Image: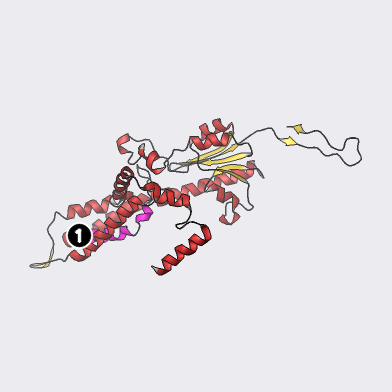
Amino acid sequence: MLPLAAWYAYHFAKTGHVFGNPQYVRYNAVGTLHVIRFVLALGERLMQITFYMNLFVPVLCMVAAMFLPALEDEPGVKRPRVSWNAQAQIGILLLANVLLFSVLGGALLARYLLPLYPLILLLCVSTWRRRVRQWGWLVALSGVAFLLALFINPPYRFAPEDNLTYRSMIVLQQRGVAELLHVAPGGVVLTAWPATDELRKPELGYVKHPVRVVAIDNFSLPQVERATAMHDYDAALIFSTKYQIVRLPNWLRLGDTAWNERYFGQYTDLPPKLIARLLQGDRVWEANSRGMWAAVLLFNRPQMAEVRHPAGTAKAKADSLRE
């Protein structure tokens, strides 16, 4: 406690804030203190530790196995279970983490619960071994389910970095940046994070030299309308900042409901065709992959140019010309 108290005191002395960036604290702690939000977040967290990314396969197999009698290695000697004490400790850890991250954390990212998944799988495998003679097949089935989850996107909201959709996102942005450098070399680019860093920082490998950017938060309607008031960019690199759920019946679009906008700051990126129309730009490149998309826009706006004549001529400076 003493080192922690000393750190907070030092932090307050240097920044004027005890817990760090006020916006960060408000988003991840203060703004999450709402009863309805807690209940909704709790439901999402429970889904993430029982269903997410095909985790339902080992969990359902475990539940089904619990209806079977314990196997006997020797007559009258049943295979041992995980001790009740260990099960209680695992249960407390699961409950504490689920409750904590239903209150803290503005974004309901599954990776916050990453330490829990080995515990859940430990209980699954222990139950299978105790009650199913051919339990190795259930291990194989679960492994195949997790492998498929890397390639097949689920019918609910998820972070692209949770499977290989993130690779598609990176490849799309690599192609978009290459096209941007080809059609608008030296221009100022309108875009959003993470492309802002990709263009500004050559060390990330997308560009060889820094590119000037104009940043907006995302490509939702409010942000695109904000960009229409700006005119200091020559091109735009636009892309889906979130996974776009494919067309499915409403009852299958798990987690994709209106309360996401109110309690979790969710938004919907506009399609590239509509963004181009609102910004009055020309789409010169567009690509789609695994529910993600990216596009490059060019803008043909009037530019001011000044012609300078050599010294000694009758007119030392030309009038400004509008191209």
User: Where is the C terminus found, in terms of image quarters?
Assistant: top right
Q: Position of residue 115 (x, y in %)?
A: 34, 60
The residue carrying mark 1 is: 127
Q: Residues within 10 Å of mark 1 (few under 14, many from 20)?
A: many
Residue at the left extreme? 76
Is residue 251 placed above or below 196 in the rendered structure?
A: above
Using the image as rendered, state which of residue 193 and residue 174 is in the foreground.
193
Magenta span main SS: helix
Viewed as shown, does residue 310 lie left or right of 62?
right
Q: Position of residue 240 (x, y in %)?
A: 48, 41
Is residue 214 placed above or below 140 in the rendered structure?
A: above
Q: Position of residue 224 (x, y in %)?
A: 53, 36
Q: Secondary structure at mark 1?
A: helix
Q: Which residues are magenta?
A: 110-128
Is residue 43 placed above or below 7 in the rendered structure?
A: above
Q: Position of residue 245 (x, y in %)?
A: 39, 39
118 is within the stretch colored magenta: yes
Is any part of residue 85 visible from this angle? yes
User: Where is the N terminus found, in terms of image quarters?
Assistant: bottom left
Using the image as rendered, state which of residue 33 and residue 106 is in the foreground.
33
Is any part of residue 106 visible from this angle? no
Question: Residue at the spot x=31%, y=56% of the render?
Answer: 97
Is residue 93 placed above or below 29 in the rendered structure?
A: below
315 is within the stretch colored magenta: no
Q: How is the image coloured?
A: secondary structure
Question: Residue at the spot x=55%, y=36% of the render?
Answer: 226
Total numbered circles: 1
Viewed as shown, does residue 172 lie left or right of 313?
left
Quarter of the image holding residue 40? top left
Quarter of the image holding residue 243? top left
Residue type, numbered disc 1: Thr
